[in-house]
């Protein structure tokens, strides 16, 4: 049975990259799949432990899911820490994954920076918790931005090793193709990796100290206009063909954003804007961004004012998620060989 799972960290400052690379695609997938969308609050404390505003950050991601168009009655929206199976399965996966696998993870290297000895153990183990998030529901498809590709590969490696190492008890229990699926990443489109508006070599990120590097989903029209106008570019006009974007990361990024927001390809956008100056292209991009993001930001603000409603969505979603998770964990414990009553 096919099932979609994905998560977003409540680390503040939800941005255009989160929307185009992830949340907007969550909305589209609910037409064809059963979907579970998780506010991964346990991941959110891996880099910075004490966040005084964490509760509101959790509510903000929840509000973004709903404001973008995910239907909490049909799909499951919940926060990770309310379902204990995530932590339990992550522990088992810490015993499945090899240290050598973890040492190859580039996100850890980027986030830990130079002072690696001082990074939390949780940041190091982030990918096994992510594997647990996905496999706790035996999800078959995971929509994510390009930056998560390596973690999805590790998830498949974990599933495969678990299936192999426990092949005998898994077969005994009648699972013919292994217990965990080899989950497919759904990565793609013109905005799978939205770059910083200040530096075309860095991805747009919640944690970038410069607010001008990103468009936040709650930015008003003026802020959006100012940030796009100030976005870094090069002096040449836009090329008329996609090949002309090679070696021009800032131009490619803005064209990719325009393409994603207008549901077109980069080539189609360049058919309209080829040879245009950036000033004209940016003006069009401001209008399009305000048109597409304005209503979402406004709805997020409206929803955030009603914390009781948001919390009821998370509570209801957690109950539904827990029902699935508990079944998986019971079987996992039997497969591993734990005694349970
Ligand atoms: P942090 O800096 O705290 O890691 P983040 O911006 O990377 O924050 P996450 O919560 O880690 O956000 O990721 C949520 C989803 O958004 C993931 O699917 C991720 O791949 C996607 N995503 C994050 N940044 C981008 C980006 N710049 N372009 C496209 N997708 C992105
Ligand atoms: Mg991230």
Image (spheres, rainbow, N blue to C red):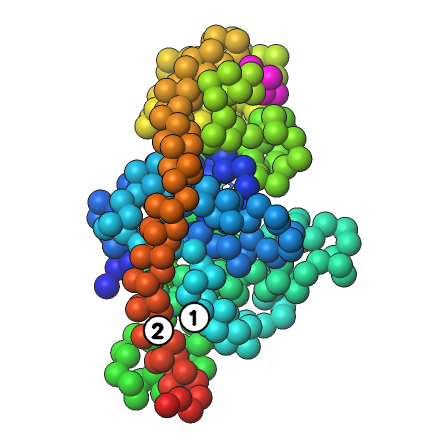
When the figure is inspected, residue 169 is found, relative to residue 214, above or below; the finding is: below
Where residue 326 is drawn, which disc sits there? 2
Helix, strand or loop status at disc 1: helix
- Of pointers 2 and 1, the one earlier in the residue sequence: 1
Mark 1 is surrounded, within 10 Å at the Cα level, by few (under 14), some (14 to 19) or many (20 or more) other residues, namely many
> Going 53% across and 20% down the picture, which residue do you hit?
223
Q: Is residue 118 magenta?
A: no
Q: Is residue 268 above or below residue 88?
A: above
Q: Position of residue 197 (x, y in %)?
A: 58, 26
In the rendered structure, does residue 230 fall within the stretch colored magenta? yes
Give me the disc on residue 193: none
Please provide percent x and percent y for residue 34. Answer: 25, 54
**Residue contact between numbered discs 2 and 1, judged by CB atoms under 8 Å:** yes
Whole-percent x, y for residue 47 in the image? 64, 53
Please say if 57 is above or below 44.
Answer: above
Residue 87 seen in the current view = yes
Q: Position of residue 113 (x, y in %)?
A: 72, 50
The residue wearing badge 1 is 85
- The residue at 37%/90% (across/down) is 341
In this view, the residue in front, 95 or 161, is 95
The dominant secondary structure in magenta is helix
Is residue 103 in view? Answer: no
Q: Confirm if mark 2 falls within 8 A of ligand 1.
A: no
Q: In which quadrant will I find the N terminus?
A: bottom left
Q: Quadrant of residue 330?
A: bottom left
Read off the magenta span.
Answer: 228-232
- What crowding class fits label 2: few (fewer than 14 Cα within 10 Å), some (14-19), or many (20 or more)? some
Q: Residue at x 55, y 41 (%)?
A: 12
Residue placed most toward the observer, 334 or 244? 334
Labels in figure, total: 2
What distance separates the C-alpha of mark 2 from that of mark 1? 7 Å
Residue sitting at x 26%, y 59%: 2
């Amino acid at each position: 049975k096919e099932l979609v799972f994905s998560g977003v960290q409540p680390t503040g400052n939800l941005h255009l990259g989160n929307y185009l690379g992830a949340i907007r695609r969550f909305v589209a997938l609910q037409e064809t799949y059963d979907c579970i969308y998780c506010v991964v609050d346990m991941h959110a404390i891996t880099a910075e432990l004490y966040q005084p505003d964490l509760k509101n950050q959790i509510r903000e991601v929840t509000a973004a899911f709903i404001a973008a168009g995910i239907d909490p009655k049909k799909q499951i929206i919940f926060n990770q820490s309310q379902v204990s199976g995530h932590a339990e399965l992550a522990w088992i996966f810490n015993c499945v994954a090899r240290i050598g696998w973890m040492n190859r993870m580039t996100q850890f290297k980027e986030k830990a920076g130079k002072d690696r000895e001082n990074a939390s153990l949780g940041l190091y183990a982030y990918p096994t918790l992510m594997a647990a998030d996905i496999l706790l529901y035996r999800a078959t498809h995971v929509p994510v931005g390009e930056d998560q590709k390596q973690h999805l590969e590790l998830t498949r490696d974990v599933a495969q090793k678990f299936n192999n190492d426990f092949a005998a008890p898994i077969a005994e229990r009648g699972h013919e193709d292994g217990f965990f699926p080899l989950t497919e990443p759904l990565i793609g489109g013109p905005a799978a990796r939205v770059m910083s508006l200040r530096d075309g070599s860095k991805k747009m990120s919640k944690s970038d100290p410069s607010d001008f590097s990103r468009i936040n989903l709650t930015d008003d029209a003026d802020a959006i206009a100012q940030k796009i106008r100030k976005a870094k570019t090069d002096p040449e006009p836009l090329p008329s063909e996609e090949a002309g974007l090679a070696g021009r990361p800032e131009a490619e990024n803005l064209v990719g954003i325009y393409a994603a927001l207008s549901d077109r390809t980069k080539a189609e956008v360049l058919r309209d804007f080829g040879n245009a100056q950036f000033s004209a292209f940016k003006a069009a991009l401001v209008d399009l961004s305000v048109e597409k993001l304005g209503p979402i930001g406004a709805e997020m603000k409206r929803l955030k004012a009603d914390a009781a409603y948001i919390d009821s969505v998370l509570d209801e979603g957690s109950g539904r998620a827990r029902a699935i998770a508990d079944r998986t964990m019971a079987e996992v414990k039997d497969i591993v060989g734990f005694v349970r009553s």
